[in-house]
Amino acid sequence: MKLKFVFVFILCSFLTLNNGCSCQFNQGLPELADLLSFKTARTRVQPLSFEHLEMMRELDNSDDSFVQIIESDNIGDLLKTQKSILESTDKHVLRQNLNFMTMYYGIFDESTKNDNLFGVIKMNFCGREYIGTDEKYHKIHQGKGYGTEVKKALFGHWQNLGLIPHVHADPDSALFLGFCGLIHMRNKSSLKYNIINCGYKMGRLFGDRVEVYYPYVIRSEYKDHFLPPEDEMLHERIYGDLCDYLSKDSPELARVGEEALRRMALKNIMTVKESALNEALNEESGFITITLSRFPHLFDSESFSRLTLFGDILDKALKELEEDYAAESIPNDRREQYDNYVNDCTKARLLLNANLR
């Protein structure tokens, strides 16, 4: 009787142990939400869900002068869709859903061990080989190096997961080609953060638009409207000019760097096809206006011959500025910026009149 009891006990223990191992085995790979999460020295970074929505809104409202992360009325549905997609264990679902996929990463303070959300990274897949990002940190956390710390860790984590290639690796081994960005030339802080601190490479300058990529992968066979140009050495050629432009110690050096960058950006506008010129002049009117006003020697006779329609654009801009001034709709903290731009428009118009006679 005792032997029978011992045998049953051993058998039950074996089944229990075996069942536990089986359950553990069946758990398989981690969900993407866990796989995509990572930590830095000061932060914990993870995909967000619907439960974080109110914290996201509070963060988004903390600084109106910064980019708005929540632009959609159906942000709640987007977060629920994101959670559903990231319950998969297969990273390829990111490509299968990229036509409508927007993914939100949350940055939490690792030292407090609580859900104190103080930063958000918005990833825009948009059917592209390169992924666009927008970032926002709570006002009290800005300027403390969190952005660089998290962004560089994000690059490394996605490279280790095989989601983007290592800098010199075969791009076919990764799910995407990398991350991309579009920075306004006059946004010096963003240029410094993305290019100098985080390692993006410049791909093209077109008016005020600076296209950046990490890593820089040339794939001419891909039909994508936002891929790096094949001039792989552009970044190395103009990196010194960028550093000069960002110089805070020497205004003269900064102006030399700005001139070099504007020369290249202007050339790319002036060499577009005739059918696309009017659209380019309208989209980059601010860039051309300031360049005409402050760096008129960059325009030769051929350039002026392509600016015959720009006078109308300038006249329209001046009229709108005058209407804003008359309506007293210019905020006090932007009055100086407004006055400077009016002066630039006036000088540019006089220069056009003198060269288009």
Image (cartoon, grey):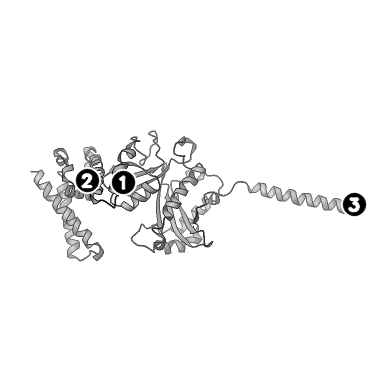
- The one nearer the camera, 118 or 92, is 118
Q: Which mark is residue 243?
A: 1
Residue 333 coordinates in the image, percent (x, y): 25, 64
For the point 19% across and 59% down, the residue is: 339
Alpha carbon distance from label 2 to label 1: 28 Å
For the point 18% across and 42% down, the residue is: 298
Give neighbour class at mark 3: few <14, some 14-19, many 20+ (Cα, 10 Å).
few
Q: Position of residue 24 (x, y in %)?
A: 67, 49
- Characterize the local packing of mark 1: few (<14), some (14-19) or many (20 or more) Cα atoms within 10 angstroms: some
The amino acid marked with disc number 3 is Leu
The residue depicted at 32 percent of the width and 42 percent of the height is: 239
Q: Residue at x 30, y 41 (%)?
A: 238
Question: Which residue type does callout 1 highlight?
Answer: Cys
State the image quarter where residue 281 is shown: top left
Which secondary structure, mark 3? helix
Q: Nearer the viewer, mark 2 or mark 1?
A: 1
Q: Amino acid at mark 2?
A: Leu
Using the rendered image of the protein, determine whether residue 339 is visible from the camera's viewpoint: yes
Left or right? Give the position of 158 relative to 320.
right
Q: Position of residue 151 (x, y in %)?
A: 44, 50
Q: Nearer the viewer, mark 3 or mark 2?
A: 3
Give how far apart the Cα atoms at labels 3 and 2 are.
94 Å
Badge 2 element = helix
Q: Is residue 309 left or right of residue 189?
A: left
> Which quarter of the rendered picture does the C terminus lie within?
top left
Q: Mark 3 near mark 1, Cβ–Cβ under 8 Å?
A: no
**Mark 3 lies on residue:** 3
On the picture, is 273 further left or further right than 153? left
Task: Please identify the quarter of the rendering in which residue 221 is found.
Answer: top left
Which residue ends up furthest to the left in the rendered image?
357
Residue at numbered disc 2: 281
Foreground pick, 210 / 54: 210
